[in-house]
Image (cartoon, rainbow, N blue to C red):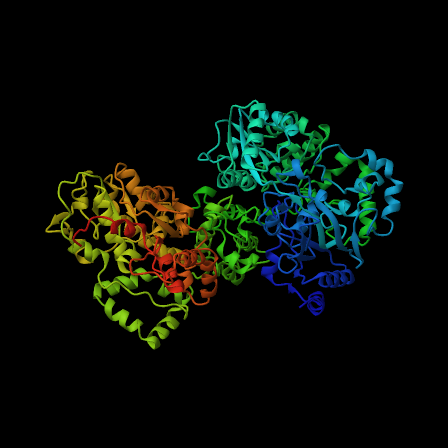
Amino acid sequence: MSELEVELRRVVRGEVGFDVTSRALTTMDASNYRRVPLGVVAPHDADDVAAVLEVCRDHMVPVVARGGGTSIAGQATGTGIVLDFTRHMNRIVSLDPETRTAVVQPGLVLDRLQDAAAPHGLRFGPDPSTHSRCTLGGMIGNNSCGSHSVAWGTTADSVRELDVITARGQRLRLGKEWAGAPRGLRDLVEGEAARLRTGYPELPRCISGYALDALLPEKGADVARSFCGSEGTLGILTEAAVRLVEAPRARALAVLAYADEGAAAEAAAGLLPYGPLTVEGMAADLVPATAALPRGGAWLFVETGGESEREARARAETIVRAADVVDALVVTDAAGQRALWRIREDASGTATRMPDGSEAWPGWEDCAVPPKRLGAYLRDFRALLTAHGLRGTPYGHFGDGCIHVRIDFDLLTEAGIGRFRRFSEELAEVVVAHGGSLSGEHGDGQARAELLPKMYGEEMVRLFERAKGVWDPDDLLNPGMLVRPAPLDANLRFSVLPREPVDVAFGYPADGGDFSAAVRRCVGVAKCRTTSVSGSSVMCPSFRATGEEEHSTRGRARLLHEMLAGELVTDGWRSTEVRDALDLCLSCKGCRSDCPVEVDMATYKAEFLHHHYEGRRRPAAHYSMGRLPQWLRVVARTRTASIVNALAAVRPLAWAAKRVGGIAPEREMPRLATRTFSRWWEGREKPPAGSDGDLVILWPDTFTEHLSPSVGKSAVRVLEAAGLRVALPPTVRLRTASAGNGEPVGGAERVGGRTTVAMDPVSLLRGRSRVCCGLTYVSTGQLDHARAVLRRTLDLMEPVLETAAPVVVLEPSCAAALRSDLPELLHDDPRARRLADRVLTFAEALERLAPDWRPPRVDRAAVGQTHCHQHAVLGDAADRRLREAAGLTGELSGGCCGLAGNFGFEKGHFEVSAACAEEQLLPRVRETMAAEGKGAEGEAGETQGAVVLADGYSCRTQLDQLAGVRGRHLAEVLAERLPEADE
């Protein structure tokens, strides 16, 4: 333990982390840069901050303040001590609705302040797209703005007073009329007043450099305002008094469509006289094809407010009439507006992938020009891109002339980095020629500070250096930012990654088969760090349960990055740090859909576990639950389910079995079905003759087969009621296959209600086998087993693949595994893609194959949760339409049930598993039951008016074990309403 660490632990009440994980999590922010800190401190209060500064001053170690770590210019990274304010100094100290003032700590997430202010009809004006995870301290450090800056300005416009500690331990309270100014600052400014009056461009968003002009007497000599945008280089913020604004009672969103980006940019400034709250722009390159936007090639998102919805809509329609648009849409309902704003807010992530899938990066994320110059600037910007052979898609705050863009820089080769530098230098000159600022929101950091002389001139930059010397004469606070900056092409985070491909099991088709490229997907925008779920989103349940960066998608991606780099994490795939961070990953796949850049941590986890345990003994749970299909098939073949259930009911035996199997002692052992779904199928009566509907292959997944055959039985009834013909996959390799009429598949023949098959001699020797999606093997990283199981499954399914029959999968996690894991794991077998493309969910099958069929009316409210794998991989649009057609009303919860297959059953995971369930699912179910005056579910699985829907076996098990509630698959609910039929 170093002397520095010893002293910090002695004087600091908060956490001190010099371990590999703590340091690895803070090597990067959301920029192109990487620096390895000595350690991380989470201060408990201002006294802790003062103590850290004193120790670091004695050792001449630099200090960097860090909030949400979403900075895009590199200013939240450093080589000394990183102060993480999000853990403890994250409170609202006070909120006074009368004076419209709040006092906050620097680690407070913006959305928490908005939530607290909303009941009083107030809000904090600035709102960056990262509002769900950025902190007030970071916003003050960068002078952040957001989409509403045309109405409410920058963060500096909303700051009243700031409590700051300087590097030399002086505690200051900054405000107007020189309040809190360090000694020498006033003399410096008064001696350079003429230069300060003429040295700044006239535009709404001049964020670059130090705001020394705010110290001029005609601007109130506002030291607090001048401190905003200083990027942690002048002092450490410990508390802030901020101004709140009155929130409109109602809002309308006008989406104005233009032919192209240039037309939208030219139009933006002309809308400002109408008093909009936002004028945001983006082009078609960043918009999903499924987005419900009016026709056009680029759009302006113009928000208006009013005392009523009618007034807000009228203002929006006035703007539509005044604008010369191709098409337009006005939305007043809150849900519709949120859906549209998500498209804009996700642009910072989606922009990191070009339409062809290639990578794009920040660096010139953030320039601003006078709004009337925006169209001309964009033309010059596009011309410069073309001249350098680069591509990028501008978007952002068109009403303020501020443009965000990710560009496909090659930051991996010497030639590419050289082009990055040349482009940066030339673009800086273009920005200045248009009277602009190198930064219009995100700060200069390392990305742009080197180029400040082009904007301000050498004399002004020297003045910035003198101001830095007044505040921080020892240059301890975030050195290398703003003044005396590091070169813009140094410390690039990609330089440490291996240049040769890493040997991996999955194919990573979206990343060219390159695991390093897959890990590079995480650009640090940290949507996974949101502390609450909105709508149907899932990501990242383990972070919300623990609040720890280590257990966020971004944190895990950072550790994988450092594992590949080999500098901090030195033992590669054997790393215990990476293993421990991935341990609480539920493999919910939420990041695959909710992360703007589609980081797929479930796949990365499976990949890591595969290598980590290669040739080594695995945790007991990998053998007990990871190989669950094997054990359940043994029970089925020996017909011992009743015996197993009886033994599991004996507590000492159950305790011993759980201990040996690595199962959480808090869990109850699920009961096995005494008659499997396949045995029921083989013994059922022949279905009604005369049906000429499409043939569907119903997949007997492990959960339906052995644990809840009632779901399979119900699905058969519903599918046949819809006029479809149902068959199960072959259980042996067959000699021939039907040409597509469905009778029989693979030579199967119906005889007396049973299915017989024509077998070759080898099949007779091998006996019957079962198809399997390999889910449990994949989730535990047993990828060699998974491949073997999946190849056997493809062998069995060959006769089906030679027909036109789709494959209906009832368990969402199994359907997701077949759609995504199968072709990505067996990327060398063309049959894998063919099978993946055949997979349909229960609702999709009914919608596509029986479009004229109408489900029985249930006419009840529905409560429950959309399975996380369905949300992430499969989509639930067909399920929503089916529920609506059946009269099942209400939205299902987002988030994750927390059981997540084997995760919630593994020893040590119960607490996190339960916390995930308590986030949305269980409170919604309990609330519904309480409202209907019923404390538990009846045998039918309904409250007095609501149906508890849970298509996933894990979700149903979690409901049963934690709430005593029986959830049901949608197939069961619909089958119950069908006319009675023989079973």
Q: Is residue 875 above or below residue 170?
A: above
Q: Is residue 116 left or right of residue 685?
A: right
**Image height of 674 relative to 159, above or below:** below
Task: Report the quarter where the N terminus lies.
Answer: bottom right
Q: Nearer the viewer, residue 683 or 221?
A: 221
Q: Residue furthest left?
A: 752
Q: Position of residue 748 (x, y in %)?
A: 16, 47
Residue at image point 42% right, 66% down: 619
In percent of width and height, residue 973 lies at 29, 51
* Residue 833, quarter of picture: top left
| Location of residue 352 with respect to 94 vertically, above or below | above
Q: Is residue 885 visible?
A: yes
Left or right side of 142 for 679: left
Query: Nearest the camera: 270 or 260?
Result: 270
Residue 718 locus on image (x, y percent): 24, 47
Residue 392 visible in image: no
User: Horizontal and vertical percent for residue 43?
Assistant: 68, 61
